[in-house]
Amino acid sequence: MKMDNLTSKNVLDTFMYCLFYKEEDTKNKVFAEGVNLPIYFHPERLKNKEPLVSKMLSELPDSFRSNGDSFMKMNVNKDGVNWSSNPQVMEQLLLLGIAIGKIQYLQPRDCWGNFEGGMPYIFIKQ
């Protein structure tokens, strides 16, 4: 499988595209809560980017789809290549995945402190 969708630039560009603009009505919104950020996405723009977000998520290691894995391991792709060393960009991908219903946390937030770095374990739905 060719892996060229999962890049810091693609994640950042997609994240920014899916946010609301200042003048837009936020009545219809998609909520996602990340490690540090609660965020609202624009529903139509999020839907437009859902195929790309799914492709980016598919390039993460299979461990995220089998039993789940630590947020701290989201920085490498299936080939073990570091696609991002920026936790904020990793969280942006996490938020996009949650917003499209492809990512879920494996434990409640109050349990995260029991895990490496106090970070959640996440599962990517097929």
Image (cartoon, helix red, strand yellow):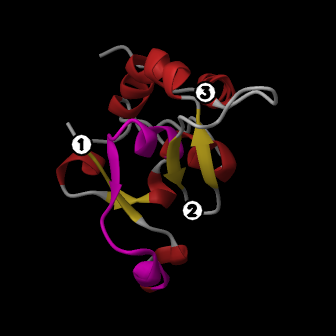
- Tag of residue 35: 2
Q: Is residue 89 visible?
A: yes
Could you say where residue 47 lies in the image, as x and y percent from the top left? 44, 21
Instruction: State the residue at coordinates (55%, 75%).
Output: 117
Q: Check residue 76 for magenta coloring.
A: no
The amino acid on which the numbered mark 3 sits, given as a three-letter code, is Cys
Dots 2, 1 in contact, CB < 8 A: no
In terms of depth relative to the viewer, which is nearer, 43 or 34? Answer: 43
Q: Is residue 124 left or right of residue 23?
A: left
Q: Which residue is mark 3?
A: 18
| Residue numbers of the magenta segment | 95-113
Q: Quadrant of the C terminus?
A: top left
Q: What is the quadrant of residue 3 in the picture?
A: top left
Residue 58 picture quarter: top left
Quadrant of the frame with the N terminus? top left
- Please state which of residues 16 and 66 is positioned toward the viewer in this rendering: 16
User: Which numbered tag is attached to residue 125?
Assistant: 1
Image coordinates of residue 104 in percent, x first then y, are: 33, 54
Identify which amino acid the numbered label 2 is placed on.
Val
Looking at the rendered structure, the number of numbered marks drawn on it comes to 3
The amino acid type of the residue labelled 1 equals Lys
